[in-house]
Image (cartoon, rainbow, N blue to C red):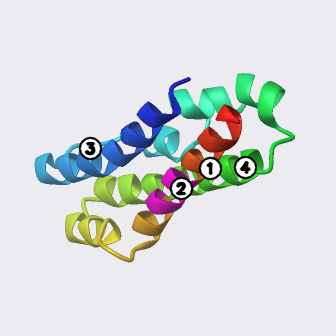
Amino acid sequence: MNLDTAIGKHAEWKVKLRSAIARQETLDAESIAKDNCCELGKWLHSEAKEKYAAMHSYSPCVETHAAFHLEAGKVAAMINARKYSEAEAMLGSGSAYSKASTAVASAIMRLTKEVKR
């Protein structure tokens, strides 16, 4: 698992969500809200759990990753409800989504550092 790539892929969610707003697309909000459907989530709940569960940075990474997906799922649900301006606001600076996005990137970086030691 390339954790640097995982940070980028999670940052891309904002672009995907904004694109869905612009195109008025329907998303799979239920899957987006789950933390074990993306590549990082699958890794965190399997191989990483076996290898790194005892590390201090592992649990916070799992928790922030789950929180991020919950927020992304809420935005997707708002898009599906055709409440596009509300969904856009949910992606804004200082929003729960924005905070969760920053938190998961930081948690992934901390886990990366600890794994490399």
- Mark 2 burial class by Cα count in 10 Å: few <14, some 14-19, many 20+: some
Residue 33 place in picture, x, y as percent: 52, 47
Say what secondary structure mark 3 lies in: helix
Q: Are marks 1 and 2 in contact (CB under 8 Å)?
A: yes
Q: Residues within 10 Å of mark 4 (few under 14, many from 20)?
A: some
Q: Which of 18 and 112 is in front in this view?
A: 112
- For the residues carrying marks 1 and 3, which lies nearer the camera in this image? 1
Query: Please, which residue is most extreme toward the bottom here?
Result: 94
Q: Mark 1 points at which residue?
A: 110
Instruction: Work out whether 58 lies above or below 83.
Output: above
Task: Choose the circle earlier in sequence order: 3 or 4.
Answer: 3
Q: Are marks 1 and 4 in contact (CB under 8 Å)?
A: yes
Q: Estimate the x, y position of residue 75 in percent, counting from the top left.
A: 38, 59
Report the Cα–Cα distance between label 1 and label 2: 6 Å
Expressed as whole percent of the image width and height from the top left, the position of residue 96 reads 46, 71
Give the alpha-carbon distance from disc 1 to disc 3, as whole Å: 25 Å
Q: Which of 36 and 39 is in front in this view?
A: 39
Q: Earlier in the sequence, mark 4 or mark 2?
A: 4
Disc 1 marks which amino acid? Arg
Q: What residue type is labelled 2?
A: Ser
Q: Which amino acid does label 3 sit on?
A: Lys
**Circle 1: element type:** helix
| For marks 3 and 2 on the same chain, the one whose residue lies earlier in the sequence | 3
